[in-house]
Amino acid sequence: MKNVAIVYWSGTGNTEAMAQLVAEGVRGKGAHAELICASDFGPNRLDAFDAYAFGCPAMGDEELEDSEFLPMYDEVEPLLAGKPVALFGSYDWNDGEWMELWEDRAVSAGLELVDSVIAKDYPDDEATSECVRLGALLAA
Ligand SMILES: Cc1cc2nc3c(=O)[nH]c(=O)nc-3n(C[C@H](O)[C@H](O)[C@H](O)COP(=O)(O)O)c2cc1C
């Protein structure tokens, strides 16, 4: 059975809700999903999984959260070259630029970017189905 890591940071719960929906999509395809807080993940946990979803809201000025998420992500990204990875996260006042920047760095690092999903604040119906679809893609 495929094992999918869903690693996320969420300050007010919006990205966490997305993570749970991604997990629903993975499980709907009969694969195993593990939800993991960013501070509990690192290079030593990579081998246990076949595919990865990373979730982080837009923070700073169109940046990834820099106390827990970014240090973890900086460490694991170089080790994920060639691996299937999906990105997701919530934002509010801008237009999703942080995700474009994140996708660019992931592709430059050689990750196999499956897809990404962004949600303005709490995931609405459209973002909900997109998150479930993302999980299903990772489980395929
Ligand atoms: C310190 C801080 C910085 C933020 N920076 C941005 C930003 O640059 N662009 C944006 O669109 N939203 C920004 N936001 C809004 C959050 O991305 C938004 O509230 C999101 O839904 C939070 O997700 P969460 O509930 O998973 O923490 C910021 C919020 C905070 C608290």
Image (spheres, rainbow, N blue to C red):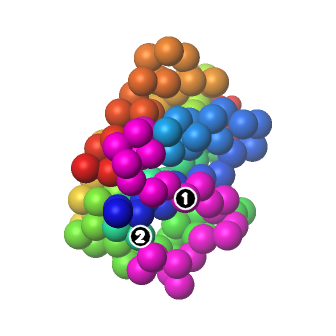
Residue at the right extreme, as displayed:
12
Which residue is at 72% across, 37% downward? 13
Q: Is residue 102 left or right of residue 13?
A: left
Residue 86 visible to the viewer? no
Residue 31 vs 100, above or below: the answer is: below
Residue 34 numbered mark, or none: 1
Task: Return the residue at label 2.
Answer: 49
For residue 82, which numbered disc appears in the image?
none
User: In this picture, is 131 found above or below 64?
Assistant: above
- Identify the residue shown where x is 39% and y is 53%: 31
- Residue at 50 percent across and 71 percent down: it is 74
Q: Residues within 10 Å of mark 2 (few under 14, many from 20)?
A: some
Q: Is residue 130 visible?
A: yes
Q: Disc 1, ligand 1: is the CB inside 8 Å?
A: no
Q: Is mark 2 within 8 Å of ligand 1?
A: no
Asked if the residue under mark 1 is in contact with the one under mark 2, i.e. CB atoms within 8 Å, the reply is yes
Numbered range of the magenta stretch:
25-48
Farthest residue, direction top: 125
- Secondary structure beneath disc 1? strand
Q: Where residue 119 sits: x, y (%)? A: 52, 27
In the picture, the quarter occupied by the N terminus is bottom left
Query: Is residue 118 rendered to the left or right of residue 7?
Result: left
Q: Position of residue 86 (x, y in %)?
A: 37, 50
Image vertical order of residue 113 relative to residue 97, above or below: below
Q: CA distance from mark 2 to mark 1?
A: 9 Å
Lower sequence index among marks 2 and 1:
1
* Residue at the image position 42 percent from the left and 80 percent from the top: 47
* Of residues 30 and 126, the one drawn nearer to the viewer in this rendering: 30
User: Can you give x and y, in whole percent of width and height, for residue 73 in the image?
Assistant: 52, 66
Count the labels in the image.
2
25 relative position to 19: left or right:
left
Q: Nearer the viewer, residue 58 or 119?
A: 119
